[in-house]
Image (spheres, coloured by chain):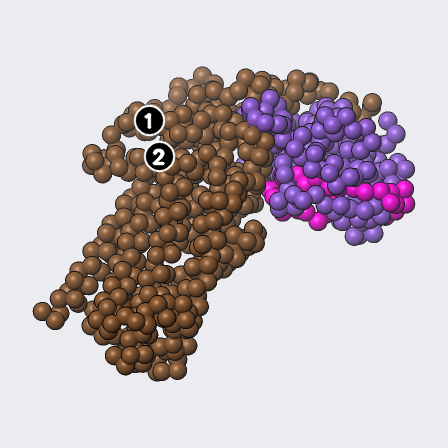
Amino acid sequence: MDFTLKTMAEYAAEGKSPEVLFWVGCAGSFDDRAKKITRAFCKILNKINVEFAVLGPEESCTGDPAKRAGNEFVFQMMALTNIEVLNAYDVKKIVTACPHCFNTLKNEYPNLGGNYEVIHHTQFLKQLMEEGRLKIEGGSFKGRKITFHDPCYLGRGNGEYEAPRMLLEKLDAELVEMKRCKTNGLCCGAGGAQMFKEPEKGAKDINVERTEEALSVKPNVIATGCPFCMTMMTDGVKHFDNTTVEVKDIAELLAEADDL
Amino acid sequence: MQYIDNIIFIIALIVGFRLFFKSLKEIYRNILLGRKIDRSDRPAERWATMGKVALGQSKMTKRPIAGILHIIVYVGFVIINLELLEIIIDGVFGTHRFLAGIFGNSFYNAFTATLEILALLVVLAVVVFFIRRNFYGVKRLTMKELFGWPKQDANWILIIEFALMAAFFTMNAADWSLQQKGAGEALGYYPVSSAVLGPLFGNFSEGALVILERGAWWFHFIGILFFMNYLYYSKHLHIIFAFPNTWFANLEKKGKFNNLASVTQEIKLMMDPNADPYAAAPEADPNAVPEKFGADDIFDLNQVQLLNAYSCTECGRCTAVCPANITGKKLSPRKIMMDTRDRLEEVGKNINKNGKFVDDGKKLIDDHIQREEIWACTTCNACVEACPVLIDPLSIIMEMRRFLVMEQSAAPQELNLMMTNVENNAAPWQYNQADRLKWASE
């Protein structure tokens, strides 16, 4: 481990509380590709001395895929358990790199007694930058083309289109937009629990359609802000046997710019 | 006998409006079949939304060609209907161009000229719409779900609007020709009809012109009454329902799905460490209707969702942006709304016939909407974003998923596996919760 990490339990044992809780999410904890995003984000926070903690084994699925599959029971079981843990630690501010966790914690937990300030990692990084704590110099990205794929649950779901773009612009790269972006963005195909099942019969897979569009603007990097979009776009790029275009989370790009 | 015109006119007016309000009452009754939902919060924001989206058409111009043409027809139609006011006064009291006397010559000239220009713009827009819909091949306007009545309906609307405008021009041109012959008082200025139809009518006798003018006047009036009553059978109902529909729209963040409070109670009881596991179950109310989760028919949808169904114009902007539909899956958000309205109408007719709803062995799910459609949704909210009148097809899809999962345990097998994993391992994949920090040490 090349970064330091503490759990909420450890903070509590010291009688302290961190600035922010980093909600890792299931993908960020278990998916091999998404783990890299998790680590990159931790490295950035480490570098600029943000005191943060994770729940570790005390974290559960937020219940998002269960709710969107129609299973309100399982969703609320997860939600109420998580809220008990979060409230026990008196958590005030949560940051997460998963728009699905972000949306659920932010919008659906308050009805069940969980009220926190919840922000997406791109919003947090933007905040840190505006406060002058995070400095982004993207020399290594000069001349490269990046296109950003809007995650539905960050964009249309919660109206956040600017934070990720602002960070990407700081990288000195050329930000190219796909035809369907922002409010008109096209889903990667994973939301609403589709990640966990085969798609219904059709002419093509949604991620193929979306990747085709992303590749058509000839980027060097397809930037994502969601671990599920990451999987879908990576699979899409493989589908087209494209070995030159990288799919990277914004946190990874920032970590890379800083050589972390 | 000289009052016979006025009497026929008044009877037509009353019959037309009575039929119209009877239809509206029926629709209102049908909407009340849904579950109650409280959408009375934040009234200021609701009025503003309605003003912006329904009155101001703010979402229409997202597709500029259709949007601008639509605004022409909308503005034209609203303003031309000011003329309906004059028609009604003239019809009831037997006057001729009553507003001329009120407005004074120059203002009345400007008024009639404005109406003529707007009517011309409406005619042009309607013609372009007709070509676009029938010959141009806009994908969302030529899809399978529009075959049959929906396509005919769309064309009828355009034809009726064209005919009404044609009658308007004929009436004005005949009146103008009579005025040229000195047979009528010179009232109004008709730049379009005098130039286009005027020369055609030049050789007509006075008698023929009077018949033409009166004929067009009656056609125009009866046409409007007919069109008003046609709305009930048509997707054109949106010209009224867009307003309440935007007022009652969901103001929450699109990502926020509603909470089922009855489930919360149950889970809290389950998780309560002080609950006595051996306690006898509380006496159940024998008259209580068992809670049903989700929706398999229109009765389980809420009233706003049913209002949504009546407000849908079948423009297909939702379907055009639906990722599932784009990639050839069966789901079409527009079809979800059309199916909901079809089922609601079916239930309404059943009630008309039987006095109350008699089980017809049908449901919205399976008989109208297929499970394959419901499971293809990615909940991405593109359809909700695209709708020019703030309809929420996604909420209906979600209610049906809830029904399939919580009432029927009929989710696709892979989703069952995912849900079991969430329940048992607190993650959608089969990993141990204890391993949640392993990423840090790899």
Secondary structure of the residue carrying tag 1 is loop
Name which of mark 1 and mark 2 comes first in the sequence.
2
Q: Which residue is mark 1?
A: B362
Query: Which residue sits at x=83%, y=52%?
Result: A132
Chain the render paints brown:
B
Q: Residue A153, how many percent across, how many down?
A: 62, 39
Query: Which residue sits at x=41%, y=77%?
Result: B110
Q: Which region shows up in magenta?
A: A135-164
Q: Is residue B63 magenta?
A: no
Image mark for residue B195 = none
Residue B224: quarter of image: bottom left
Q: Residue A238, how many percent across, how many down?
A: 75, 26
Circle 1/circle 2 CB separation < 8 Å: yes
Query: Which residue sits at x=33%, y=26%?
Result: B362
Quadrant for the N terminus of chain A, please: top right
Query: Is residue A88 rendered to the left or right of residue A215?
Result: left
Q: Which residue is mark 2?
A: B343
Q: Residue B129, how many percent across, how many down?
A: 47, 51
In the rendered image, is residue A206 in sight? yes
The colour one sees for chain A in the rendered image is purple
Q: Is residue A152 above or below residue A206?
A: below
Query: Which residue sits at x=56%, y=51%?
Result: B63
Q: B277 and A237: which one is in front?
A: A237
Asked if labels 1 and 2 share a chain, the reply is yes
Quadrant for the C terminus of chain A, please: top right
Q: Residue B316, how many percent across, how many down?
A: 49, 42
Which chain does the residue under circle 1 lie in? B
Q: Is residue B409 above or below residue B135?
A: above
Q: Is residue A155 magenta?
A: yes
Identity, as a three-letter code, of the amino acid under mark 2: Arg
Q: B240 and B168: which one is in front?
A: B168
Secondary structure of the residue carrying tag 2 is helix
